[in-house]
Image (cartoon, rainbow, N blue to C red):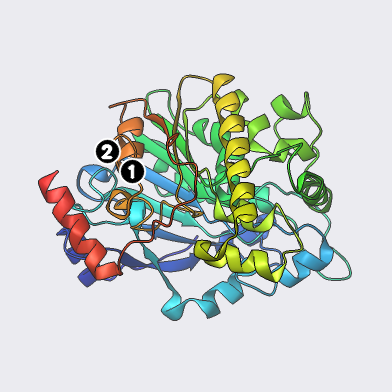
């Protein structure tokens, strides 16, 4: 059991819709240690919780932090010395033990009208397996524990203890590796609720493509093979997938999404900066690195590689959706970025920086889909070049965004 305090001064301001973003205390789930639900280094898992208020008291948003995976003992050992493998490192890194909730976690009613007063529970990522591992034995040499699935279960038990089981609306989401975790846990999350509860999931930049015949395919397969092996995931992955594919291929969402029964929304860039930057050329040359950091420095060959990646992602996603339930929503754009929901320019105000589809920003699209105002299924099929959608500095962006919502 754990406790936290949200400063009343902050809470009063965000309830009034004045402050964009608010700080939330990070808490350790100490009760998880007894069941072995611990980080790679054996420390207890961490979360940040902002209580709902007003008519949001029966609405819950649970979000997985992202941050890649570790693929072997050496990789996991290095990770255990960072906030992505140790809550002790997390608490020492975060100033005053707080984290900022922005974007679609924001409690500002103007900037985040659909979700501003929900309970928000952010689960920090410290296992390196998208919350899927459950290895009983501790590594005897390096004292590493692989217990992501136990962390997930312990966090869900804590959520039910503090009232989530009474939710009328529930949303599970995550970014990057947290987006893959959302895909893997979506149906399991839905099973926690009554049949009358609206339960949906959002994967944010979590659609990692296999690209079997594209650059880096062997490396991508080898990487996930080693993740499966290191974390003992063979029997932890959904049998709906492993009955048809190898466990390695069951970390690629294209092989998972068709069998998910719970409504799922995908936020993706057709020019996903992480996938383009890290999974096409694992040994990146200085020239490629320069291109990745500044699109204006890319030569035509490098741009053509990005365009080819776009085709792979779009066609894979189209095929996946065609084989899935009609309850799939998606927002697939052409901005060069990775991650959206926790950032004002990536979600609640994305339209202001040029990232809109059907005249909606990403947060509006998710809201329309979640509340059944529309099925929102939009891909940018016009722009076949990567675009910079960074916008202005934060104060100017917030002002423009507030003006947009006031007049929209």
Task: For residue 85, say whether it is visible.
Answer: no
Q: Which residue is drawn at 78% across and 24% down?
A: 243
Q: Element at badge 2?
A: loop
Percent from the top left, x then y, of residue 274?
A: 59, 55
Q: In this view, does 337 lie to the left or right of 9?
A: right
Q: Element at badge 1?
A: loop
Q: Distance between the residues labelled 1 and 2?
A: 6 Å
Which residue bears the numbered disc 2?
Answer: 359
Outermost residue toward the front? 300
Percent from the top left, x then y, of residue 101?
A: 36, 61
Q: Residues within 10 Å of mark 2 (few under 14, many from 20)?
A: few
Query: Which residue occupies the foreground of this view, 14 or 66?
Result: 66
Which residue bears the numbered disc 1?
Answer: 356
- Indicate the quadrant where residue 392 lies: bottom left
Percent from the top left, x then y, of residue 293?
A: 55, 67
**Quarter of the picture holding the C terminus:** top left
Q: How crowded is mark 1: few (under 14 residues within 10 Å), some or many (20 or more)?
A: many
Q: In this view, does 235 lie above or below 258?
A: below
* Cβ–Cβ under 8 Å for marks 1 and 2: yes
């Amino acid at each position: 059991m754990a406790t936290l305090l949200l400063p009343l001064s902050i809470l009063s301001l965000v309830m009034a819709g004045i402050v964009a973003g608010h700080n939330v205390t990070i808490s350790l789930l100490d009760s998880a240690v007894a069941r072995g639900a611990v980080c790679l280094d054996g420390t207890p898992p961490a979360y940040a919780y902002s209580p709902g208020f007003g008519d949001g008291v029966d609405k819950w948003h649970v979000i997985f932090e992202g941050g890649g995976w570790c693929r072997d003992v050496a990789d996991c050992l290095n990770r255990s010395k960072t906030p992505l493998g140790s809550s002790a490192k997390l608490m020492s890194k975060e100033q005053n033990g707080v984290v900022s909730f922005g974007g679609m976690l924001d409690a500002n009613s103007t900037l985040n009208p659909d979700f501003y007063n929900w309970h928000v529970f952010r689960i920090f990522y410290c296992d390196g397996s998208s919350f899927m591992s459950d290895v009983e034995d501790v590594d005897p040499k390096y004292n590493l524990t692989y217990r992501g699935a136990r962390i997930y279960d312990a966090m869900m038990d804590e959520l039910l203890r503090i009232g989530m089981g009474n939710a009328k609306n529930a949303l599970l989401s995550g970014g990057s590796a947290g987006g893959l975790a959302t895909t893997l846990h979506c149906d399991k999350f839905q099973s926690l609720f009554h049949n009358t509860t609206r339960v949906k999931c959002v994967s944010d930049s979590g659609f990692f493509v296999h690209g079997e015949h594209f650059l880096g395919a062997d490396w991508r397969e080898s990487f996930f093979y080693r993740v499966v092996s290191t974390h003992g995931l063979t029997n932890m992955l959904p049998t709906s997938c492993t009955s048809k594919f190898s466990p390695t291929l069951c970390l690629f969402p294209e092989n998972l999404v068709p069998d998910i029964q719970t409504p799922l929304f995908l936020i993706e860039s057709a020019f996903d900066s992480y996938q383009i930057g890290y999974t096409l050329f694992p040994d990146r040359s200085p020239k490629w690195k320069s291109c990745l950091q500044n699109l204006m420095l890319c030569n035509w060959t490098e741009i053509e590689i990005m365009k080819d990646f776009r085709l792979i992602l779009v066609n894979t996603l189209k095929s996946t959706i065609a084989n899935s339930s009609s309850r799939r929503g998606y927002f697939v754009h052409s901005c060069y970025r990775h991650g959206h929901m926790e950032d004002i320019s990536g979600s609640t105000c994305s339209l202001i920086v040029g990232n809109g589809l059907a005249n909606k920003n990403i947060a509006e699209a998710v809201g329309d889909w979640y509340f059944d105002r529309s099925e929102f299924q939009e891909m940018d099929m016009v722009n076949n070049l990567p675009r910079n959608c960074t916008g202005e500095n934060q104060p100017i962006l917030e002002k423009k965004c507030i003006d947009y919502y006031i007049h929209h």
